[in-house]
Amino acid sequence: MEHHIKSWAECAPRLVAVAAGRDKADLVIRGGKLVNVQSREILDDWQVAVAEGRFAYVGPDASHCIGPDTRVIEADGRYLIPGLCDGHMHIESGMLTPAEFAAAVIPHGTTTMFTDPHEIANVLGLRGVRMMHDEALMQPVNIYTQMPSCAPSAPGLETTGFEISAEDVAEAMAWPGIIGLGEMMNFPGVINGDPQMLAEMAATMNAGKTVGGHYASPDKGVAFSAYVAGGAADDHEGTAEADAIARVRNGMRSMMRLGSAWYDVESQITAVTEKGLDPRNFILCTDDCHSGTLVNDGHMNRVVRHTIACGCDPVIALQMATINTATHFGLERELGSIAPGRRADVILTSDLTTLPIEEVIARGVTVARNGKLTVNCPHYDWPADARGTVHLGKVLTATDFAITAPEGKNSVKAKVIGVVENQAPTQALTAELPVVDGLVEGEGDTYQIALVERHRGTGAVTNGFVSGFGYTGKMAMASTVAHDSHHMIVVGTDREMMAAAANRLGKVGGGVSIWKDGEEISLVELPIAGLMSDSPAAEVAAQADRMVAAMAACGCTLNNAYMQHSLLALVVIPSLRISDLGLVDVDRFEITELFEDNA
């Protein structure tokens, strides 16, 4: 069933009648301190009255709105804050469907999400986006969908299951839950005037919607200016104070993220706390949060807490997770503040700094209390073809992962993808590697990586080298979560086990499989598009915890190593990546050779 909320216009007669005292409210909250993100004030003992799922009256005394059937919540001196908004995120990163993601984050106070389902777009195309959109609209909270812009993320450097066209974008702009265009990752395309990228942005702007940005380059010169001129309205790829400042000065919203592997708030919030820039142009987001983070640490409440801990005024931090986000997407009259007419999304908390989420109300209904969900999050009926997306085309063997050395070489100088802890960019390293029986072998902290084609069943495998995980002994790890094209990434020290892990995922329809000493020691099943599970978050998180422990058992020492594994094919972030077409030099945006010419 679709959780429908009537428009302000439809509700206005009743809202006016309740505010005037002629009609009685459905809900009144009194005895609290109202955090007003419109005026940046804390108003003691202000009260709110709710009707039709929207705020009718907000002021010092709502007693005239209370009738015999009005539900009254005594706030007992607690703060009333708006429901939290996540300005940019990918539901698929939680390994959960929209329904189970909503069920996981509602108890943390998230009542609005702006989601870009570009992961499923790479696997199932426009149809997959529609499925995500439809399940999103079934939820008791607000989940807006951005139409993915870049599948493939870098044309010519990877092959996706489906490609998104400008026509697809124009079609999606008419869907009820589409709020704009997903992050425009192909920034070189925009800068060089690529007609398709510009057409997608034009279709979005012509529909009066917001173009999401993604400018993953340190160059703040002419290239950055050209990108902004194309229409991208926000950017979450900043990692330093200067990045945040450049974006805001150019009229973009600076989105600062704290996800499972992103730590970009602390380095940028000083633009507000020290440089004194106008905070209304800064927005908080998560980008990517895996299920363990959601179950154990929180969602947007975690980001707001962290922002406050970085020295930001608590009310300003809340604005960055409520009104600023709503305003950016043209929804300031709809949500993001406790004000008349807005959706009645409100949190009761006893402390503005530690932010315990004690009661969550969405559209006037209590949806969570003391960390427990109190509503149902309905599931979409995912069809069989969305559950059977891993097409290997053959049974893989160790031979598929063999890297043949150039004729007559005893050792080779190979290019190696260097993983950097807690950062998305990789290093372009080189290593002198031994040749045994004509095959190049990994050595020390350098081992094999392979990208296995899984959309069309071609049987193709691209092989290379990676370092930085700390793996030891005989092991392999395979994952069908492989941003952004979502083929299959396999990393291992043993070719037999690399084949075994890949074949295992072919059998179960996707997920993550880890092997050690010839046996599978961890499996996370992600049957929907090879990206998501429709099991509850706690179950998926438990599987993910076992996966993290399994990686550690293989010698891995990195924080959030799984996120690093899944990004190794992300051919839009420097410096070296792997795709189904080969090793990719992202600094040059071209395919490169595995071996350096050391003749």
Image (cartoon, grey):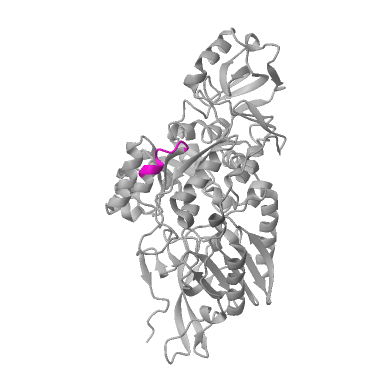
Q: Quadrant of the N terminus?
A: top right
Residue 9 location (% of width, % of height): 47, 20
Task: Answer yes or no: is residue 270 visible.
Answer: yes
Q: Is residue 75 magenta?
A: no
Residue 448 location (% of width, % of height): 53, 75
Which residue is outermost to the front? 384
Q: Is residue 173 magenta?
A: yes
- Does residue 70 lie above or below 195 as drawn? above
Nearer to us in this view, 408 or 391: 391
Nearer to us in this view, 491 or 98: 98
- Does residue 462 lie above or below 544 as drawn? below
Which residue is outermost to the bottom? 408
Quarter of the figure with residue 248: top left
Determine whether, in the image, residue 189 is placed left or right of residue 285: left
Residue 120 location (% of width, % of height): 50, 53
Q: Quadrant of the C terminus?
A: bottom left
- Does residue 589 lie above or below 185 as drawn? below
Which residues lie in the magenta part?
170-177
- Does residue 463 lie above or below 561 as drawn? below
User: What kind of secondary structure does the magenta stretch mostly adopt?
Assistant: loop
Residue 585 location (% of width, % of height): 39, 67
What residue is rendered at 50% in x and 68% in y? 418
What residue is rendered at 28% in x and 53% in y? 194
Determine whether, in the image, residue 554 is placed left or right of residue 199: right
Quarter of the figure with residue 327: top left
Task: Answer yes or no: is residue 470 visible.
Answer: no
